Amino acid sequence: MTPSTTELEIAPTADDHRIARHAAAAIVLTVAEAAIPLPLPGVKPGLANIVTLVVLARWGWREAAWVVLLRVLVGSLVLGQFLAPGFFLSLAGSLASLAVLGAAMHLPRRWFGPVSHSVLAAFAHIGGQLVVARLWLVPHDGVFYLVPVFALAATVFGLVNGLVAARLLADGSVPSPAPRDGT
Amino acid sequence: MTVRAWLADWAAHLRAGDVLVVGLALVFCVASATRLWHGGRPDKAVIKAGGKVFAEVDLAAPRIVEVPGPLGTTRIEIQPGRARVAADPGPRQYCVRQGWLASAGAVAICAPNQVSLALSGRAADYDSLNY
């Protein structure tokens, strides 16, 4: 198929296909993870973030943002959580962690790898969630009582997800981008 | 593969900054836990006799406060961060047997001698009268 040269026609580009593929992988992980019993609402491994980290490292922030937002949207639709409180919590957490990832990816690569990105994003995620929870769902400072639990979960799962992402990136099992102009 | 080799394999993916970030994250966990879960640390003991405040004692330095009551003298012992009724002339010794009080909001009441010892802090863990 020859690529369309007109702007009027909507033809998915290779980028679109790739984003869709990554988002699909992330959604599968989200749904699979929903089957794991959780001790506390809000504490979960966030395995889909492995995909986010890999996409961030390989394809940049814009694509990672697409993958995250598609995953949050479709994941909530599949699980029947769309527009439920949990959806807004994960949306807030995801937006906060995307913002932090946007900053963290500019840390020197020599010293800071996917593990740093992962832990920082996990902390941003609980931060975003707690802000929404405090302002809207539980308008009481009692929510902050659970901060240490969330922080520990963010540290542990951030570390594990970051290590898995680092490993995937290192052993070449994820395709790397063909050299492109610009980014 | 031994556990050690397996761990080393994973640790190879950690960079210096990553170790720093994980370390700071753990420090944050511990700091937030001690901060948020020890909010009930008392900083002051309020001693009442006959319904009136007899003394407000800072819990920083050890000292002994002797409080006069209708039955005799109740001796209250203060130590850094905690306080107790060391001796009381009351018949049942409930307040003495409560031992050391160490959290904000904790109260020992020596009813016969009309003496009470209460610890107060910025954030009380609980209201011990409505426990």
Image (cartoon, grey):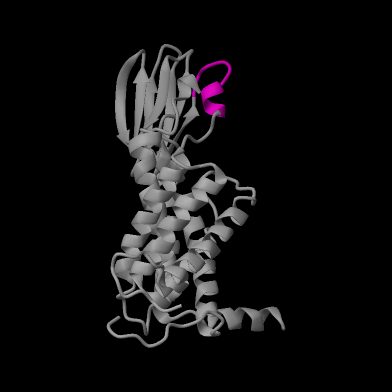
Residue depicted at 36% across the width and 17% down the height: B49
**Left or right of B97, for residue B82:** left
Residue B95 belongs to magenta span:
yes
Residue depicted at 49% across the width and 52% down the height: A74
Residue depicted at 40% across the width and 27% down the height: B118
| Residue B109 visible (yes or no) | no
Pick the front one: A49 or B97: A49
Find residue A158 and report its horizontal and vertical position in percent.
48, 64
Residue depicted at 45% across the width and 13% down the height: B71
**Magenta portion: prevailing SS class:** loop
Pick the front one: B56 or A179: A179
Write down the region rendered in magenta.
Answer: B88-97
Compared with A152, A21 (above or below) is below
Find residue A35 and report its horizontal and vertical position in percent.
64, 50
Find residue B70 and report its horizontal and vertical position in percent.
41, 11
**Left or right of A84, for residue B47:** left
Pick the front one: B20 or B79: B20
Count the marks: how many?
Answer: 0
